[in-house]
Image: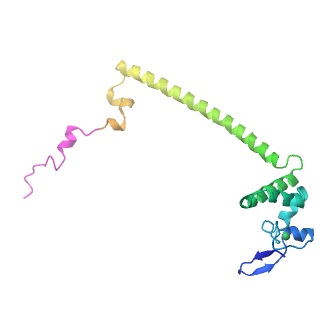
Amino acid sequence: MGFQVLAGGTRALQPCAACRMLRRKCDSDCLLAPYFPGDDVEKFAGVHRVFGASNVAKMIKIVEETKREDAVKAMVYEATARLRDPVYGSVGSIFHLQKMVQEIKLQLESVRAQVSDSQKQRDQLLGILMNLRHLDLVSPINDPLLLDRDSFTLDDETMAYDPVNFPVECDWIS
Ligand SMILES: [Zn+2]
């Protein structure tokens, strides 16, 4: 019988799903017990129907122990997909994702073309503006090219009101 740790920390003798389904004795060294707990018969039923119990055991055996959990997950995924889609199985998902990648690539190309167009339009507008400035048709005060945050600096008039460097003389403070 396989051992299963229950919530209370006690061990109960319960055959794994594989042994239950195959009506065989579940030993403490049962290869399938760690991956197919007795309370989840469906999980084993799927891989058993698609791959067969002995093939599942073989596939687990050839994988090193640290990767067996992942190998079982992959087998369960593949079996579920195969039962749902007898023609393509998990390849159906791969085709679907490849199609999505292709569509997203096309969208990306389209967005890149739009960005490129916008940059060209901006450059043309800047060129026109530079020409107008050159011809003195735009006064510097209304020139959007000068409305840059960096172009604003403290002028002399502002500095004159600095109370530390330029204390205001006032005779009304006693
Ligand atoms: Zn077992």
Q: Is residue 7 above or below residue 45?
A: below
Q: Is residue 115 above or below residue 39?
A: above
Q: Quadrant of the C terminus?
A: bottom left
Locate residue 155, reporting x and y percent. Answer: 23, 38
Task: Indicate whether residue 114 is drawn in magenta.
Answer: no
Residue at 78%, 68% (x, y): give it.
Answer: 34
Quarter of the view holding residue 72: bottom right
Q: Main secondary structure of the magenta part?
A: loop
- In the image, the segment drawn in magenta is 153-174
Nearer-the-camera pick, 49 or 151 = 49
Q: Is residue 118 above or below residue 158?
A: above
**Does 166 sit left or right of 140 as displayed?**
left
Residue at 77%, 45% (x, y): give it.
Answer: 94
Looking at the image, the residue that sits furthest to the top is: 135
Looking at the image, the residue that sits furthest to the right is: 23
Nearer-the-camera pick, 31 or 51 = 31
**Does 143 sit left or right of 114 as displayed?**
left
Residue at 87%, 67% (x, y): give it.
Answer: 18
Q: Is residue 90 above or below residue 126?
A: below
* Ligand 1 position by quadrant: bottom right
Nearer-the-camera pick, 157 or 33 = 33
Locate residue 60, reporting x and y percent. Answer: 80, 59
Task: Indicate whether residue 171 is drawn in magenta.
Answer: yes
